[in-house]
Image: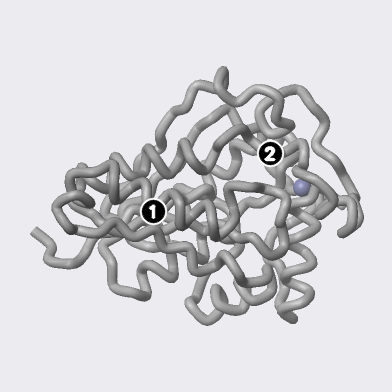
Amino acid sequence: MSSRKKAVVLISGGLDSATIMAFARSEGYELHGISFDYGQRHHFELQAAEKVCAANNVASHVVFPVDTAIFRGSALTNDIDVPHNRSDDEMSGSIPVTYVPARNTIFLSIALGLAESLGAHDLFIGVNAVDYSGYPDCRPEFVAAFEAMANLATKAGVEGQKIKVHAPLITMTKAQIIQRGVELGVDYSLTHSCYDPSPDGISCGECDSCLLRLKGFADAGAIDPIAYQN
Ligand SMILES: [Zn+2]
């Protein structure tokens, strides 16, 4: 049995999660990936998650199915148009229609269960509050509150094996995340960010997620290795 400390890493297949997985690997953890199949229209990200996990030699990778019925009213899971070509002001003006109800609370709770089952006390999540301030469950106060709850909610926490939720990207800009990822050797060609890809998985280049990704690469002085429709 490995003596390395185990970490559970939430891996969506996007740029931030690929960076966080490389970060956890660089810290020497034995990696256990968890992804969620929640009926997202950009299900190509699950294939990306698989590739990112393989590239990081994970010890295990679970794709957990979540019934879409609990995620109504989001453009990511329903027949609601994903906004295209929004300005920075429009993106930061209000919580976007791509918000998925309580997503990170649900995902982190399931990841916490997996972590305690595995004897892992460290969870890694690639949430980021700077370039995408619209999602309430991507804020530092949310992560701190979840960590406090996790330590009240688990046998491990109560017995003094503190559960830690690592979110080191949370105050970084997209450009800083990409620069860190490049240093860590992340292969961003494996990742998928687009909310509204073509039927064969080509990114649109116009949704909020594509625009933030493209701006991040431009600001980082790096080339985005994936293809775009536009
Ligand atoms: Zn897109």
Residue shown at 76% from the left, 22% from the top: 79
Q: Is residue 62 left or right of residue 132?
A: left
Q: Which residue is mark 2?
A: 99
Relative to 120, is 197 above or below? above
Helix or strand or loop: what does disc 1 sit on? helix
Q: Residue 141: which quarter of the image? A: bottom right
Residue shown at 77% from the left, 64% from the top: 214
Place of residue 64 in the rendered image (x, y in percent of width and height, measured from the top left): 40, 33
Q: Is residue 122 left or right of residue 54?
A: left
Q: Residue 6: which quarter of the image? A: bottom left
CB under 8 Å between discs 2 and 1: no
Quadrant that contains the N terminus:
bottom left
- Residue 147's tag is 1
Q: Amino acid at mark 1?
A: Glu
Place of residue 203 in the rendered image (x, y in percent of width and height, measured from the top left): 74, 48
Q: Is residue 126 left or right of residue 64?
A: right
Rounded to the nearest angstrom, the CA distance separating label 2 from label 1 is: 22 Å
Q: Is residue 137 left or right of residue 220?
A: left
Upstream in sequence: badge 2 or badge 1: 2
User: Which residue in the rendered view is the most extreme toward the left?
Assistant: 1
Helix or strand or loop: what does disc 2 sit on? loop
Residue 193: in sight, yes or no? yes
Residue shown at 50% from the left, 21% from the top: 67
* Mark 1 surroundings: few (<14), some (14-19) or many (≥20) residues within 10 A: many
Q: Amino acid at mark 2?
A: Tyr
* Mark 2 surroundings: few (<14), some (14-19) or many (≥20) residues within 10 A: some
- Disc nearest the viewer among 2 and 1: 1
- Residue 179's tag is none
Place of residue 148 in the rendered image (x, y in percent of width and height, measured from the top left): 37, 52
Colour convention of the picture: one colour
Relative to 32, is 189 above or below? below
